[in-house]
Image (tube, helix red, strand yellow):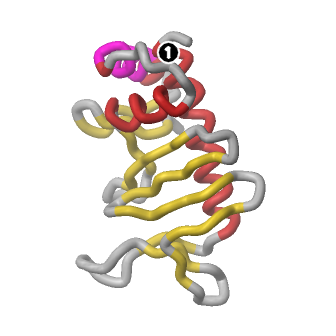
Amino acid sequence: MNSYDVVVRFVANLGWCLEMLRSHFSSIDRAGATEPLKARTAFGAAERSGHLEGLGAFQLHGVGCRVTLDSGEQIDFDWDEDGDATFDAWRLRKFAHSIGSEETSDADLLAACRQLAAAGLLVEREAGWYALGS
């Protein structure tokens, strides 16, 4: 699988993960600047990790989330100040390894991101950090 295919697969899985998280939780936020992220249900329960039926396991961390799909694929992302899911070459490389595509380089992954950004599918938020396009 080439780097472009890896990024396309990551982006598709990221969209699916975000959709599933949003359908199960009313918000994912922190109570204060130094508090950890928590996924909140409509009933007020707060979780930092768990398993979502049909998706896999999720673990909130720092300003982001790692989802291990039932297939074993790992999607890791951060949320930026606007609440958009963002990712970089390190996260893409982790995903590539989880799908057995270990020959991808950061340079090739970022080149694929730039290609998808030129097509309007991704937006470069800051140097090397991408978010889903509109």
Q: Quadrant of residue 102?
A: top left
Residue 41, image x and y in percent?
62, 80
112 left or right of 22 in image: left
Question: Does residue 15 lie above or below 1 as drawn?
Answer: below
Query: With 98 as the anchor, is 71 left or right in this view?
Result: right
Front one among 50 and 11: 50
Query: Magenta stretch?
Result: 107-115
Which image quarter holds the N terminus? top right
Residue 19, x across and y down, in percent:
65, 53
Residue type beneath disc 1: Tyr
- Give the residue at x 62% y 71%: 25
Please name whichever residue, 133 or 104, is drawn nearer the observer in this view of the structure. 104
In this rendering, the answer to whether 72 lies above or below 29 is above
Look at mark 1 in the image and give the residue it sits on. Answer: 4
Query: Which quadrant holds residue 130?
Result: top left
In the picture as drawn, the residue positioned furthest to the top comes out as 2
99 up-or-down from 111: above or below: below
Q: Position of residue 72 (x, y in %)?
A: 61, 41
Magenta stretch: includes residue 131: no
The residue lying toward the viewer, choosing from 107 and 100, is 100
Q: Secondary structure at mark 1?
A: helix
